Amino acid sequence: MRTRNLGLSAAGLVIAVIYLIPVYWMVATSLKETGDVFNSPPDLVPSPPTLAAYSDAVFGDSAVLQGIWSSTIITIPTLLLTLALAVPAAYGLARFSLRINGIVMLLMLAAQMLPTISLALPMFAIFSDYGLVDTYAGLIIANTSLALPFAVVMLRPYMLAIPQDLMDAGLLDGCTGFRAFVKIGLPLVQPGLVMVATLTFVMTWGEFVFGLTLATSDAIQPITVVLNRFVAQFGTQWTNLMAVSTIIAIPIVVIFVLLQRYVVAGISEGGIKD
């Protein structure tokens, strides 16, 4: 058993290193001089390291700062709106036995399989009629439509696991159905809420297609679209590109480090509950 555990630990370490190599290379490249990027053989460690790319491409570029701000404005409301819609929807699908429940869940699963570009083009046509193109509201609605089916599917097993006896006890104590759900049900599904919130944040923060198609002005475009400007026709600004990419990755890394226990528990518990 001990040998097996050591083998699994070694395999996990190897996989982690493989996944972390691109991350390290991104950070290392962002700390290099522009000319050192093309050294052969490549420098594994920046020598000497420099923050010039961060100074020029991040803090010295108003478009990048505006893109980060736009991504923040889009991501946080999308996260809150997704949870506000997904929680009651998942609870309803879990607690009320309706004939259409199976069809609704099937549609939710099918919606996650659609390529984002196939949704962006019809949305552009619809949003144009309602003045939502090139607005934060339009991008929030679009990103919510992408995250909502995923959130409902992931939360439904948690709602099924809420003991009905506890809900009935809350009703007997004088709570309304809504109050009983808020006071009793929501605390029991906290791991699922944290997991869905974290993954929704990651999906929205890194979304590119909606930002490219539905935002036409620099003031609205998220940072993922601004990042594409460093890939020019006659060459890529590698140090600047990697510096901005590192800044984009920091919130995701911080959130996963702080909430990894809830995310892992949420995914594993949601996968085995029926």
Image (cartoon, rainbow, N blue to C red):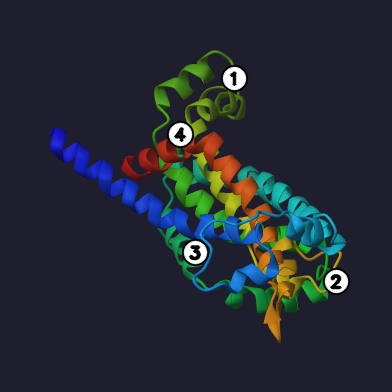
* Residue at the (47%, 68%) spot, across then down: 113
* Residue at the (62%, 53%) spot, across then down: 249
Label located before the other in sequence (2 or 3): 3
Q: Foreground: 88 or 25? A: 25
Q: What is the spatial separation of the Cα atoms under label 4 and label 1, in whole angstroms?
A: 32 Å
Residue carrying label 3: 112
Amino acid type, callout 2: Ser
Label located before the other in sequence (4 or 3): 3
Dot 4 alpha-carbon crowd within 10 angstroms: few under 14, some 14 to 19, many 20 or more: few
Residue carrying label 2: 217
Q: Secondary structure at mark 3?
A: helix
- Please say if 130 is above or below 90: below
- Please say if 82 is above or below 116: above
Left or right: 51 with respect to 246? right
| The C terminus lies in quadrant | top left
Q: Foreground: 7 or 269? A: 7
Q: What is the spatial separation of the Cα atoms under label 2 and label 4, in whole angstroms?
A: 39 Å
Rendered image: mark on residue 175: 1
Disc 2 and disc 3 in contact, CB within 8 angstroms: no
* Residue at the (53%, 50%) spot, across then down: 151
Q: Secondary structure at mark 4?
A: helix
Residue carrying label 4: 261
